[in-house]
Amino acid sequence: MTPSPIEPIAEALIKARRLAITSHLRPDGDSLCTSLALALALEQMGKSVEIVNADRTPYPFSTFPACARIRIGEIPSRGQDAVVLLECANVSRSGMTGIDGDFKINIDHHYSNDQYADLNWVDAEASAVAELIFELCLRLPVSLTPEMAGHLYCAIASDTGSFQFSNTTARAFEVCRRLVQAGAEPLRVSEALYHNNTFEKILLLGRVLSTLTMAGDGDIAVISMRRATLRELGLAEVDTEDITTLARSIRNVNVVLFFKEMDEETFRVSIRSRGVAHAAHIAERFQGGGHAHAAGFTVHGPYDRLIDEIPGRVAAIMRELAAPPRPDR
Ligand SMILES: [Mn+2]
């Protein structure tokens, strides 16, 4: 058995004086809030710490005052004693291009990790990378402040979909219990994460849901978002994952097709699936791709024709994918 990398990582952090923390492109609640907590821990130890991400902070995290400290850009080459990469399967996932010569610490909770760093800690059993940073904090000469606990709790709440996804384990609850004991406030976190919508966002939700139709055997929900609607509401980039979640919450729905108008007669169709329905296998038939339950493809043509044709084609593909393989003749 390989010894736990937590001790060498703690030692390296204790030794370092200047540190940079980064996480993946299109950062999420886990990567962002865990970065904030780790930075506070290291600063408590007297380190100089910079959080640098390649992509800007998305909503609602962009409204968190603590996220204002995150610099968007590049980590200077050899400008620090160590770079901590959170949830990055490899360096390119961080979007950083100049850190090849830097000492790297890789901490992740996803199976697919290239173990590319000088110190690697990959624990796929952890619900969130925040769980690992919580354990790390116990090994470091720091006290868990309410602020740090709040960030770590927010990271786990966010990565478990508010304790609903399959990564909601006893260990996640145990860590959260200790975080709440240390001063994390679940009510404040859920207010910040889920009760933080703008008026325009809720209007958009209504407009998108009013396009809802069903296809297949009632197992496909179809929704659309047009550019004119976004223009009218004065919205530019907007997170629509929660709208998809509502469509997917319909009883018996296994696949959501979300048509997003990108350009004149160009639509990005995101697929979200559950159960055995395989989003990536569907997307591949349209030259798209993605993961088992989240994928997408692009189609061109007039909206009325696409919305008429594509759901039926997806239904046929789903029937084909679900059919048992034909015996060899
Ligand atoms: Mn995560």
Image (tube, grey):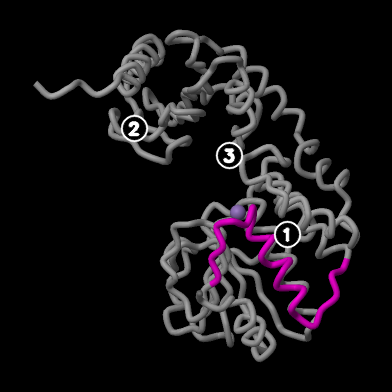
Element at badge 2? helix
Q: Which residue is nearer to you in this view: 33 or 319?
A: 319
Quick check: marks 2 and 1 in contact, CB under 8 Å?
no
Say whether disc 2 or disc 1 marks the residue closer to the N-terminus. Answer: 1
Amino acid carrying mark 3 in the image: Glu
Residue linked to disc 3? 237
Q: Residues within 10 Å of mark 3 (few under 14, many from 20)?
A: few
Amino acid carrying mark 1 in the image: Cys
Which disc number belongs to residue 281?
2
Residue linked to disc 1? 67
Name the image quarter holding the C terminus.
top left
Quick check: marks 3 and 2 in contact, CB under 8 Å?
no
Residue found 43% across the figure and 73% down from its top: 116
Gap between marks 3 and 2 measured at Cα: 28 Å
Percent coordinates x, y for residue 286 in the rendering: 29, 29
Magenta-highlighted residues: 121-145
Q: Residues within 10 Å of mark 2 (few under 14, many from 20)?
A: some
Q: Is residue 302 visible?
A: no
> Compared with residue 119, is residue 222 higher up or lower down, i.e. above or below?
above
144 inside magenta stretch:
yes
Gap between marks 3 and 1 measured at Cα: 19 Å
Residue found 49% across the figure and 24% down from its top: 258
Percent coordinates x, y for residue 166 in the rendering: 61, 41
Element at badge 3? loop
Say whether disc 3 or disc 1 marks the residue closer to the N-terminus. Answer: 1
Q: Which mark lies nearer to you, 3 or 2?
A: 2
Element at badge 1? helix
User: Quarter for ligand 1?
Assistant: bottom right
Q: Which mark lies nearer to you, 2 or 1?
A: 2
> Compared with residue 192, is residue 253 higher up or lower down, i.e. above or below?
above
Percent coordinates x, y for residue 180 in the rendering: 87, 55
Say whether disc 3 or disc 2 marks the residue closer to the N-terminus. Answer: 3
